[in-house]
Image (cartoon, grey):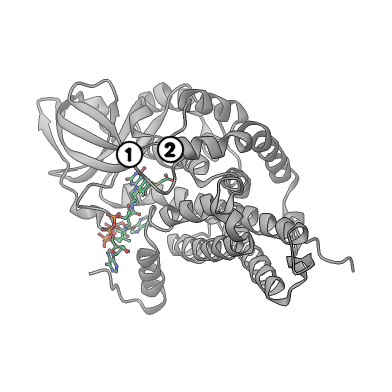
Amino acid sequence: AAAPDPRDFLALDRELEDEERDIRDAVRAFAADGLLPNVADWYEAGTIPDARGLAKRLGALGVLGMHLEGYGCAGAGPVAYGVACRELEAVDSGLRSFVSVQGSLAMTAIHKFGAEEQKREWLPRMAAGDAIGCFGLTEPDSGSDPGSMRTRARRDGDGWVLDGTKMWITNGSVADAAVVWAATDDGIRGFLVPADTPGFTANTVRHKLSLRASITSELVLEGVRLPGSALLPGSRGLGSPLSCLNEARYGIVWGVVGAARACYESALEYSTTREQFGQAIGGFQLTQRKLADMVVDVNQAQMTALRIGRLKERGECHHNHVSFGKFANVAAAQRVARTSRSVHGANGITLEYPVMRHMANLETVATYEGTEEIHALSIGQAVTGVSAFR
Ligand code: TGC
Ligand code: FAD
């Protein structure tokens, strides 16, 4: 048998189908030319300077809502979608976030719960990147427990009035429309709020030390009057936003394999070129142990992602499988990023290398879309049958 390829030790990419490999190559090439050369500057600036231009370029690449059917979406399989997330997050978690929020959260909410007219109005524009969407579930006092939300939608004749504050909303200040989750007399429902509606404002969160190449915002809704047609009529209860989260969480299961791979590959390259005590540091036993730990984590995380992807393809992926993947793979990526940082010595703390940027980003990734603790509790509940959330 051939010796393992250090960049794909268990030859897992050989398990990809042709369509999946084509998407991998297209996104990887796009990322190498159009994202990687700029991302450290965006990170340092703490923003994506031309979010609209980026949306259009990602739309042209075909990755926005790529796993959805119809309305200008590609209808790609879950593994193809996962591979795209992996290649984007190999550059930066903020860029995968952009695609997750647009496709897996905002577009998925409209696709699953929207009226035909809402789908026709928004989905093709969002798939093309001509319109940007965001997804407002979290509030200042309701994070892990979104069921405690205070944002309220009350009936006003045929329409609705929304009041409340959403916090930590990715792309909030650049969005054309926000999917806002609000409590009503009938439980939690979703609303499609155009950003130019009077009473709606978005304020950018400043001074983040993680996910800096991403726009994060507070959404304030003060007496926002909406027509009856703004309701997502199919949405009902907390299960509706949670079912969208499953899609985005699935993208993270794959995405963080990319972040981990980038950190491992940077350490591998560095360890063969950096010399101390008269030899490449990759020749020291302690460095080899670090490389072994990293390559095992990257490949195990990739196996987990691929397995969950194939289950999803067959309609056999339960949301607890996704919790398993997010819990295991984010932790693996964090270990790899930290280990890789140590291999790079002082150079590892700069933006010249991607490792500290990934390491800081992964703090956000471990928090959003359900914290590490929330997913541990989901797995605990799945294996014991006992809920320990409250
Ligand atoms: P609980 O009573 O357990 O559940 C309420 C209803 O929802 C159902 N359900 C799910 N359905 C689909 N998918 C899931 N993952 C589901 N989990 C639960 C459940 O069966 C029930 O249905 P029904 O019919 O019986 O009513 O609700 P709970 O209040 O006890 O909370 C459960 C918990 C803690 C798991 C949930 O609230 C949770 O997941 N909390 C974490 C919140 C979170 O992940 N927020 C993310 C915000 S969005 C974001 O972070 C975007 S970042 C994106 C980026 O930039 O990439
Ligand atoms: P809290 O829920 O207050 O948790 C604090 C700590 O307590 C955590 O360690 C948590 O695990 C722990 N904890 C809470 N409950 C329990 C329990 N029952 N048992 C044990 N431990 C527990 N949200 C959106 O709606 N849309 C977005 O687009 C979005 N984008 C984001 C982008 C960024 C950069 C960040 C940082 C967050 C984003 N979020 C978004 C919000 C994110 O989903 C929340 O931060 C997350 O759900 C956790 O909520 P919290 O920060 O309020 O923490």
Which residue is painted at 40% across and 72% down in the image? 382
Q: Amino acid at mark 2?
A: Gly
Label placed on residue 46: 2
Q: Judge whether 80 appears above or below 291 on screen.
A: above
Residue 71: in sight, yes or no?
Answer: no
Label placed on residue 280: none
Q: Judge whether 382 appears above or below 311 on screen.
A: below
Q: Residue furthest right?
A: 1
- From the top left corner, tell me how far across and down residue 259 is, in percent: 58, 53
Q: Residue furthest front?
A: 277
Q: Amino acid at mark 1?
A: Arg
Is residue 149 left or right of 177 when viewed as pictured? Answer: left
Crowding at label 1, few (<14), some or many (≥20) Cα neighbours within 10 Å? few
Tell me the quarter of the image containing the C terminus: bottom left
Q: CA distance from mark 2 to mark 1?
A: 8 Å
Identify the residue under disc 1: 206
Crowding at label 2, few (<14), some or many (≥20) Cα neighbours within 10 Å? some
Answer with the quadrant where ligand 1 appears in the image. bottom left
In depth, the one of 276 and 137 nearer the eye is 276
Which residue is painted at 43% across and 60% down in the image? 319
- Under circle 2, the secondary element is loop
Which residue is painted at 67% across and 37% down in the image? 32
Which residue is painted at 36% across and 67% down in the image? 373
Dot 2 or dot 1: first in sequence order is 2
- Under circle 1, the secondary element is loop
Marks 2 and 1 close (CB-CB < 8 Å): yes
